[in-house]
Image (cartoon, helix red, strand yellow):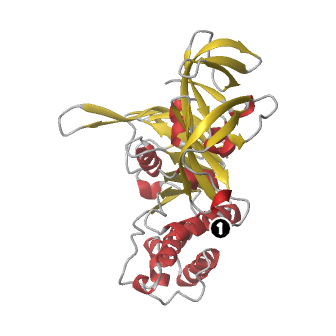
Amino acid sequence: MSEFAIELRDVVKKFITPEGNELAAVNHVTMQIKNGEFFSMLGSSGCGKTTSLRMIAGFEWPTEGEVYIDGELQGRKPPFLRPVNTVFQSYALFQHLTVFQNVAFGLEMEHTSKNDSRRRVGEALEMVRLTGMDKRYPKQLSGGQQQRVALARALVKRPKVLLLDEPLGALDLKLRKEMQLELKSLQKEVGITFIYVTHDQGEALTMSDRIAVMSFGKVLQMGPAVEIYERPANRFVADFIGESNFLDGSVKSVKDGQAVVYISAWGQELTGIVTSKVNVGDEVAISIRPEKIRLSDQSTPNAISLDGTVVNSTYIGSDTHIYLDVRGQRLKVWEQNRVSTLDPRAYYQNGQKIQLSLVPENTLVLPKE
């Protein structure tokens, strides 16, 4: 048995556009996805994540490179011969069949005995907490319940790998957040590899053991959620995952994993953590997360303190989003609302002068590309 459930080795997938041009939807992608891992491919539309998933499923074949499942070369093996199953955003349930019949459909195609089929469907429905609903039809279920039927139908065949193509996209925000936690819990319970495709960064951060951030057919960074968020490899990743403030600067010195960068717009030097190799003289992007900027009336030790003016302040419940003008540059600051109050003086007002502190450990020095 291979250490990896899925391997993509230097995979390229090219399509011909309607204009007759050649497009590399997946461009020399290499991935190794471990057994029992919850792995997400994250990126905007057209980044190559769904095409990569379809090549694992066997719906598409690579133009170059190879796909391995459990150490076995897949070549041009069709989907029904691969030990994987796919859950789609649309659910694709048969409306004229009951929940039981929907889940049992794949087993019937394999001529599984009635007793075995009944037992396995019961186990699958128990896994997704739909016991007792086997006689209902899809139209009698909520969106979240229909999604669970689609999951049960995929799990009942006991695939080595479950592929999920934006399966929560049709649900409302509250239900989607609930289902994220349920999916993660279910994955731990069944112990099989989940490969999840999404454009929702919060979804990927919530559920994944590891994430591959993709853009224009390439993997820009792959690693655990905390690493992707706290140590993005470049400006694109920092911008795509969460919110960030960016400042342009040039590197003055590099030592012990930190760089001193001159910000010409401020006439100010900042010290930050280097996430990828940079050299003295390089033009770089400084990235600072809005929640990591401290606002106060007094300076913070080991920090650069700057004066700012509140341009706008938006209360959003758990946080207040403050937009500052700092020497002609616009900065976003997210501050948690720790005290419950209706007093308007407790919140920032437009035009208010405020001091902000930038500490080196919250300041990232990134290559511009």
Q: Residue at coordinates 45% horizontally, 82% vertically from top-left?
A: 101
Q: Residue at coordinates 54% horizontally, 31% vertically from top-left?
A: 246
Residue 72 placement (x, y as % from top left): 56, 43
Residue 214 placement (x, y as % from top left): 48, 39
In front of the other: 279 or 21: 279
Left or right position of 359 against 94: right
Instruction: Say whether residue 207 is visible.
Output: no
In front of the other: 300 or 61: 300
Q: In this view, does 345 lie above or below 232?
A: below
Instruction: Say whether residue 325 is visible.
Output: yes
Find the residue positioned furthest to the left. 19
Residue 70 placement (x, y as % from top left): 60, 47
Q: Residue at coordinates 44% horizontally, 41% vertically from top-left?
A: 75
Q: In this view, does 161 lie above or below 310?
A: below
Residue 172 placement (x, y as % from top left): 47, 69
Find the residue positioned furthest to the right. 301
Residue named by callout 1: 342
Classed neighbour count for the residue bearing mark 1: other residues with Cα under 10 Å, few (<14), some (14–19), many (≥20): few
Left or right position of 127 against 42: right
Find the residue positioned furthest to the top. 281
Residue type at mark 1 is Leu
Residue 280: quadrant of the picture: top right
Q: Is residue 198 above or below residue 18?
A: below
Tell me the SS state at disc 1.
loop
How many discs appear? 1
